[in-house]
Image (cartoon, helix red, strand yellow):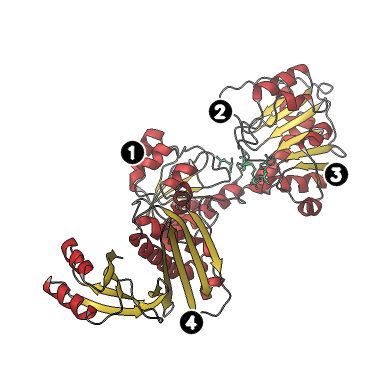
Amino acid sequence: MPKVLISDKLSEQAVEIFRARGIDTDFRPGLPAEELLSVIGEYDGLAVRSATKVTAEVLARASNLKVVGRAGIGVDNVDTKAATEHGVVVMNTPFGNAVTTAEHAIAMMFALARQIPQADTSTQAGKWEKSKFMGVELTGKTLGLVGCGNIGSIVADRARGLRMRVLAYDPYLSEQRAIELGVRKVDLEELFAEADIITLHTPLTDSTRGIINAEALATMKKGVRIVNCARGGLVVEEDLRAALDSGHVAGAAFDVFVTEPATENVLFGHPNVVCTPHLGAATSEAQEKVALQIAEQMSDYLLTGAVSNAINVPSVTAEEAPILRPYMRLAELMGSFCGQLTRSAIRSIQIELEGHAAELNADPIKAAAITGVLRSQVDSVNMVNAPTMAHQRGIDISVTRHDREPDYQTLLRVTVTTGTRTREVVGTLIGGDKPRLVGVQGIGVEADFAPRMLYVRNYDKPGFIGALGSMLGEAGVNIATFHLGRRESGGEAIALVEVDQRVDDAVLASVKALPQVVRVDSLSF
Ligand SMILES: NC(=O)c1ccc[n+]([C@@H]2O[C@H](COP(=O)([O-])OP(=O)(O)OC[C@H]3O[C@@H](n4cnc5c(N)ncnc54)[C@H](O)[C@@H]3O)[C@@H](O)[C@H]2O)c1
Ligand SMILES: O=C(O)[C@H](O)COP(=O)(O)O
């Protein structure tokens, strides 16, 4: 039974779902970092929000871990690169808290426009400062969205409902989508120059870090207001403080900070600053949605192999998973066949799909084939890290779908090249799920992928089968099955021999010394 640890304050619905699906679940919100390090080795899954830092050190200790699930959107607290290297899937819930966070951004905008937090404090202090809190109307004002993905789009929709004019800067936003959303796609300079209120909705990346700094602030309208419910670090906090102090910026509403938990911050204490403690996703509706979604996604992955909303592997739907699983197994075995025959640096791996296979999601099949090829070189390779490992080794990967009619209902071909050699195997599924080899090096030969096999390349001349049989017999090696194939033009032939015992190097050397034999390899699957 898989075992999952929940180390952050997720809705307890997550626990119920994991347990209902037969997953042993430990609910330990607020688990200290040192304890996480000492217990993580026991778990197959780790469910978190933003508090737990899933560092390279945690991942190095996580010898059984298969999946990290983030109940929320931002995965910046997870070292995704290290997770990928360790073969751990990282998944999030990209939509579950988007509406709630967009609503928080709108609430922050109102809080700024009408100074609601300041007026509340003053009123409850018995001051009744009616003339002190003169606000601004939002109707007719220009809202500048930096980032117009899930949350930015919802903010745009709500802002249009408030009769605001909406500009969006997002290099990945298409003109068509901008028209659908009723926003004007602009460049950053135009947005800064025209917006009365700027709201940030991008991830924190190298291109967005400090996107609002002193230089940017200087190009904004005097009296601009800034909302950040995305990530600390998008705004240079010291630069913003200076612009607030000078009066150039009329107000700022921040939910996220460079350092969190933010117990102190340069923005704190300014009369025109409104802060919340990373509450963007904090509604009961959003928390139920993200907890439920992440528990379902992680359970699906651990129990069926279905992958949804993963950051570092291709998605496999629950419907696809049972169909793809035998193909992934076949691709991995075929890759392994090529990998075991390859003793030098690999230049390329080509995966070809024909018949039914050509209609499937090729990404998981590709990852499985690469895993198989690399497994004879690297122990730690798996479906998650295989494409990265191939990339790091400079291996060129290609996938081709053919629409020609294959001889079999469904067919995969894996071709591995090195500087000097090409290995090619062809495989199919018998009865829908049983892997079967049907060709090697362009020669038709049918065989199962047996636990122990000999692969023999020989000249098609009399005497070979008898000589090989008696040599193995004398060495006490029983032949379970024997499959032969030869090039129709003659000359070259292949034998795939399933054996019941391991064939030691001395026997392999004697087989190799037979006059008809070109090469012999011991393979295991
Ligand atoms: N405060 C909270 O509690 C809270 C809750 C949920 C999400 N978030 C954060 O909100 C942010 C947005 O989330 P989302 O779900 O909308 O993400 P998303 O991926 O759907 O959208 C992000 C958008 O930013 C755009 N983008 C990327 N680089 C950009 C750049 N250099 N300049 C301009 N735009 C750029 C992308 O094209 C994309 O459209 C994330 O940082 C997320 O972590 C915060
Ligand atoms: O990226 C997110 O989903 C938000 O930042 C929410 O974070 P939280 O789950 O820690 O509230």
Q: Which mark is residue 259?
A: 2
Q: CA distance from mark 1 to mark 2?
A: 26 Å
Q: Residue furthest right?
A: 140
Q: Earlier in the sequence, mark 4 or mark 3?
A: 3
Q: Residue at x 51, y 42 (%)?
A: 49
**Residue on which the image places disc 4:** 407
Does 138 sit above or below residue 438?
A: above
> Can you tell which quarter of the image residue 275 is in?
top right
Indicate the secondary structure of the residue bearing disc 1.
helix
**Ligand 1 lies under 8 Å from the Cβ of mark 4:** no
Q: Nearer the viewer, residue 301 or 291?
A: 301
**Residue on which the image places disc 1:** 38
Amino acid marked by disc 1: Ser
Residue 422 visible in the snapshot: yes
Q: CA distance from mark 4 to mark 2?
A: 62 Å
In the rendered structure, the answer to whether residue 322 lies left or right of residue 102 reads left
Residue 503 visible in the snapshot: no
